[in-house]
Amino acid sequence: ALSERLSRIVKEMRGQARITESNVSDMLREVRMALLEADVALPVVRDFIARVKDKALGADVVGSLTPGQALVGIVNRELAATMGEGVADLNLAAQPPAVILMAGLQGAGKTTTTAKLARHLIEKRKKKVLTVSGDVYRPAAIEQLKTVTAQAGAEWFPSTPDQKPADIARAALDHARRHHFEVLLVDTAGRLAIDEALMREIQELHAVLKPVETLFVVDAMQGQDAVNTAKAFKEALPLTGIVLTKLDGDARGGAALSVRSVTGVPIKFAGVSEKIDGLEVFDADRHAQRVLGMGDIVALVEQVTAGVDMAAAQKLAAKVKSGEGFDLEDFLEQLRQMKQMGGLSNLIDKLPAQLAAKAGEADLSRAEKDIKRKEGIICSMTPTERRKPDLIKATRKRRIAAGAGVHVQEVNRLLKEFEQMRDMMKKMKGGGLMKMMKRMGG
Ligand code: GDP
Ligand code: MG
């Protein structure tokens, strides 16, 4: 994931004073790989990298930031900006009914999303909603919309396969006006691939309906192909927003970045299940994190440098790098640094979403208390015991337990955890702050 690639670079760049052509290329190579792995389209990746490079070379590295940290900051900001910042809700500012036109390939999720949006508008914005299907090529599609509209608790306007889509649109619009519907959602036909006739048809619908929102519905699993589809729809229609569906699948989600860059319009919603309530308002920052495993790595880097005694951390890192000599003093030092970094709950917020979700399942206040108890146990050991934990046998354990006011089992548990940590650190050879925190927090 990007976060791992970036933290490695931050570390490697630690000794360097400036952002240069050569160290920036190393970092950007990692970013490029991460984006391609996430299925972002190649031209989009190229543009992105070029923009970051431009900004990085012109940037002053301020204050205590290392070039690596400064670069991570630039990448992070650019990513969020490309993905679209913040949250963009539906625009309903129109003489009622506000019309929303759904566009996209067959199977993208238009019909499902139409019903999900109906439900969203009823529940969250208390609107009176009518749906209609312009998909005259597949009678089953009209029935499908009828069924899901009922599930959404909205009303459905009948249409039949022998009608022209534009006529259906006019009739639905008229009905909506006369019955004071506030929103009219218009589902449309899709083709398996982009074709002229389909584009002309939906352009005609657009002319008749004058929608306030024209949403391009796209399957996140399309990956690289999403770019071409998005381009074609963008050229045919004045899109106002995107709905990215099937994000619950194993899509790597890079499509979001691609589609957003190509169309220039915001991603407004994300489909996250087949069910009627499987629609989320799209949050660009969160998505960037989810897709790329990014987390708020900048904040994390800042917090870590602010909270941690750098000299102690470096000493520790050196020890860990050698894989030897990691003792209970170091373990204690780590526990203390975790506390200094603002508490576990605070840190969890900064982790990549998937990780944070896992960690969030744990009881954090208990985890924090747990750290204090561990500190207590280690403090009850003699300096020699801390440096040579292998010395700690039964009698010593009983004495330590009594001193710390805990059961012997807890001392055992702590020693076990220490050993696991030591093993893990040998494996990591000093890297992987994230991994370390995952272990300790989750
Ligand atoms: P349309 O041809 O564009 O109208 O696509 P449909 O709305 O009929 O959806 C095609 C298939 O994708 C259906 O089986 C839907 O249940 C499924 N689908 C749509 N959106 C989502 C989503 O967000 N998540 C999942 N898992 N399935 C979805
Ligand atoms: Mg459909």
Image: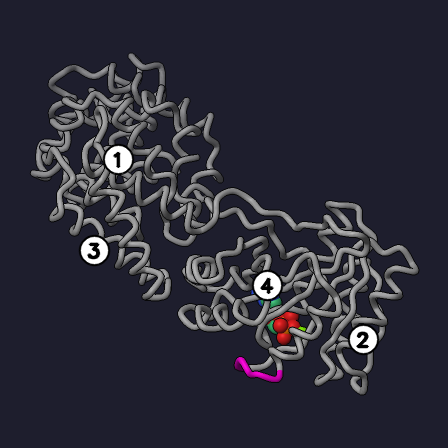
**Mark toward the viewer: 4 or 3:** 4
Q: Which mark is residue 416?
A: 1
Q: Determine if the magenta segment contains residue 195.
A: yes
Q: How far across and down, in percent of the image, does residue 62 sit?
A: 23, 27
- First of labels 3, 2 by sequence position: 3
Pick whichever, 280 or 179, lies toward us: 179
In the picture shown, does residue 70 fall above or below 279?
above
Q: Quadrant of residue 101?
A: bottom right
In the picture shown, does residue 342 fall above or below 272?
above
Q: Which mark is residue 168?
A: 2
Q: Determine if the magenta segment contains residue 162.
A: no
- First of labels 2, 1 by sequence position: 2
Asked which secondary structure carries label 4, the reply is loop
Q: Quadrant of residue 376?
A: top left
* Mark 2 → mark 4, Cα distance in angstroms: 21 Å
Q: Residue at 59%, 68% (x, y): give it.
A: 237
Query: Which quadrant of the render holds ligand 2?
Result: bottom right
Q: Seen in the image, is 333 located left or right of residue 163?
A: left
Q: Residue at 28%, 48% (x, y): give it.
A: 52
Q: Which residue is mark 4?
A: 238
Q: For the residue marked with disc 3, what is the amino acid?
A: Arg
Asked which secondary structure carries label 3, the reply is helix
- Callout 1: few (<14), some (14-19), or many (20+) C-alpha neighbours within 10 Å? few
Q: Which residues are magenta?
A: 193-197
Asked which secondary structure carries label 2, the reply is helix
Q: Residue at 12%, 23% (x, y): give it.
A: 387
